[in-house]
Image (spheres, rainbow, N blue to C red):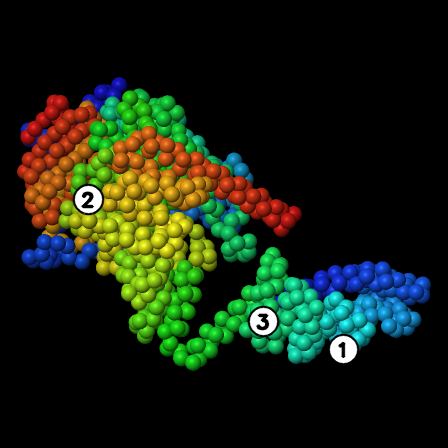
Amino acid sequence: MRFAFRMTAIAAWVVSLASTLAVSVVWLSSATETPSFPGTRATGSAAFEDITEASGINFRYVSSHTSKKYLIETMGSGVALFDYDNDGRLDIFLVNGAPIADPTPKGTVPRKDGPSTWNRLYHQKVDGTFEDVTEKAGLQGIGYGMGVAVGDYDNDGYEDLFVTGYGRNTLYHNNGDGTFTDVTASSGLAGSGWSTSAAWVDYDNDGLLDLVVLRYVTWDWDDFWCGEHREGYRAYCHPDLFSPIAPMLYHNDGNGHFAEVTQQAGFAKPGKGLGVAIGDYDKDGRPDIVIANDSMPEFLYHNDGGGKFSEVGLSSEIALDDNGKTYAGMGVDFADYDNDGWPDLVITNLANQRYAIYKNTGDGSFTYASEPTGIAAMTVMHSGWGVRFLDFDNDGWKDLLVAQGHDLDTIELSSPQLRYREPLLLAKNNNGKGFMDVSASSGPVFAKKWVARGLATGDIDNDGRIDAVITTNDGPAYILRNVTRTTNHWISLQLTGHKSNRDAIGAQIKLTTKDGSQYAMVSTAGSYLSASDKRVHFGLGQNTEAKSIEIRWPSGNVQNLSSVQGDRLVKIEEPSAAKENN
Amino acid sequence: MTGFPLRRQCATLLVLMLAVCVAGTALRARPQNASADDHFQLGAQALTDGDFGKAIKEFDAVIAERPAFAEAFFNRGLAHQELGQMADAAADFQSALRLKPGLRGANLFLGIAYYKTNDFSRARTAIQREIKLSPNDAKALMWLGIVELGAGEPEAAIAPLDKAAELAPKDVDILYHRGRAHLTVSNRSYQEMYEADPKSWRVHQVLGQAYAESERYMDAIAEYQKAIEIAPNAPSLSEGLGDAYRMSTQLDKAEQAYSRELELDPQNLMAMYYLGEIRVLRGNGAEALPILQAVLKEKPKFADARYYLARGLAEVGQNAAAEEQFKLVIQDSPESELAQRTYYQLGRLYRVMKRPQDVERAMQEFQRLKVAADARESANLEQRKKAHAERDADQNP
């Protein structure tokens, strides 16, 4: 059955197959269109600019704040950056809330009531502006939305959408003609409870994307008064007041249906999951899953193979901070920031807690590295949600971009030194040794204060610099264009699996230049409630080419490319042979 | 002024309590004349019921028949005091004291009567006489403090209020007035300091402390920096700066500040401890060890210092010594939150030492303590939820 999907898909994109290298260069674009600094190797002043208005995107997340301060109001929402129509340009999907009655009776599942609360799909046009194609696509949505995950679950060559929410999740099949079909009922993915982040991952490497869906807490419009008992001081309740709940793990049966395998896979440990990311932390060829839990130990699910997982957060030392204490884990990303070949972790949390950086030691455990990397000092007063490792200046080192803002709109009453609205954080990677807060010198957009939540990254304008989309709670979404002036080079890889899942999610890439090697895994997951561009971007520094690229496909295939020219997107097909060297 | 209703409430409570007590004593004294006995009982009951006019009439009748009966004057004085007739109250208390100089409470209520007419000098003298008779009367000590506060002598109020708080540590009225006295003294001191020299480093030090206490660490840092600029060699400023940097996790700067503090005051144990802790947190265990060892030499029971010493030892690979120190931390306080964290560190250490069974045991102990702590926290939360629900029900019946 799976092969039937595949044949259709191959016919659609076989034209892009080129050369015996199975590599096709799609376009070439220079990152130096803005003035460069002759003779400098490193980055000029970093900068992102807010292009929301010019882009034609006019979205506002409706969280429906009430006098009851229902916890759900302050948590949303997510965004996806993906190319739904395969035109080579990233499109944007934004999740929206729904009206909430004040008060809301227990058992209520909110419903969207019109265009103001619809989810939105924006299609990027040739000129870089966006058009709202929500109605045509049939993606208005139904309930109170939270997050989104992107993956081609049926390997037909078109990215599908999974939208999480309160009471019900929705799987949208991309029909390939600009429309989507709600296939939730037949897929078995409706779920229950309050779902947050989700991730597509082929955990058993059978060539079909499976799905992880986090749930936050056991919650049903509980009407507790938290905070001071006086007018204006009622606050959102701490998650400690609510019981944890297990995530859901779904196995893709290959026929459009998913089987819920949470229990049998050993994935049923109750948590308070907000963020999820995938990475092969022990390089055993199987993707592992990290879950950022709010105010309880963080989880790392080691993929044991055979469809089984073991939760090893505590023994791998990512469950707690360096003092053995829990924190409010929210966003998470899984990437190798120090280029040592082992994927590391970042988990955002609330003010006074310090975002957690866990450096992978390579022996199956991690070292809490927030202090020595400088992350602790720069984040202690901030509350982070969406987070991504990204090499914004193409110097070959992955930096950090964080969406910030407190969860309590009353925080300034109780803690005057903290802020509800906060600027974004951009932390530059100092050659893997640590990070430096460069927000202040990165453009006026970093002076704006938002209640930011979701964050997705990708090269929206295909200029070789990673851009970002930020969502805000009860506010607009912002499109941030990376206009960093740099003479550094880059390369972007778009992998297409054949034996492996078509998105190549889980493929591990080692890219080597004269300066050394960098490592990445293909994934659309990570951050908070959001999905990012699946294309893998590398900064090459002053190198114009990658000396070699090694790809370990989820199928086990290993592919080697050499002398790959930079400053371009390179499409790579999974070879049919078990091993191919070029 | 916000203190007055509370004072009045407190005085009322005291009056009623003593009235009943004194009435009881008087009844036991049994005046010879049956009519005076009846009037006394009726007066005491009226006093208890809050019918002070009637009480006065009844005690008038008692005094008419028995003019040397001190308790009748005392009780009538209480009734006058409750009606705000302070001159009459004072006269009755004085009469009672003339007849019975050792009568418990008479000097106190005489003092209260003077206090309420702003005659602080005579109030002070009367209450001091009461205290001489009953040196451990917490309420009398409290009233002496209140009188001193009223007289604008907060410094003089502190000693009796501190002693009252010692005698009755849970008495919220005493604690309230004690806090007020200390606050007034400190505010006055800061005000005088500011007036004497607005640019004094002490002003910046106080502001730094205040900001730090309200967790405004950036502001605290700015104030301490100003203070240090003015008085670079004053001890404790760099410690305060170090604290603010530490609390805002600017550990590199905190380390510099504590180092500077130790140049000025090499015996500052807290600066030594925090310097050691920071060096451990920054991965510089080797430099932390001698400092933390010196702290523990002075204060062997300083469990947090021992915890960081153990972490420092682990950092430099002295694993056996680290294990020993971690075990000492646990031994001192096996069920504490620090023990929980120590088990976690032990688990990490055993993993490095490749002792998987010990890793498992340590992590199990960590989990056990964590589960217990979580259970306590859950119980607290349940109580809070219940209290929330009850309060909501009261407010929205």
Residue at horizontal 88 percent and vertical 73 percent from the top: B67
Quadrant housing the N terminus of chain B: bottom right
Question: Could you say whether the residue bearing mark 3 is in a helix, strand or loop?
Answer: helix
What residue type is disc 2 on?
Answer: Asp
* A416 versus B153 height, above or below: above
Going by the numbered disc 1, the residue's amino acid type is: Ala
Left of A164 or right of it: where is B380?
right
Q: Name the residue under label 1.
A: B87
Q: Distance between the residues labelled 2 and 1?
A: 84 Å
Residue tagged 3: B157
The local secondary structure at tag 2 comes to loop
| Camera-side residue of A309 and B363 | B363
Q: Do labels 2 and 3 share a chain?
A: no
Mark 2 lies on residue: A338
Would residue B116 be seen by someone viewing this image from the given angle? no
Position of B138 compared to B193: left or right? Answer: right
Could you tell me the amino acid type at mark 3?
Answer: Ala
- Where on the picture, by quarter, is residue A180? top left
The reply to whether residue A339 is visible in this rendering is: yes
- Which chain is disc 1 placed on? B
On screen, residue A41 versus residue B244, left or right, reads left
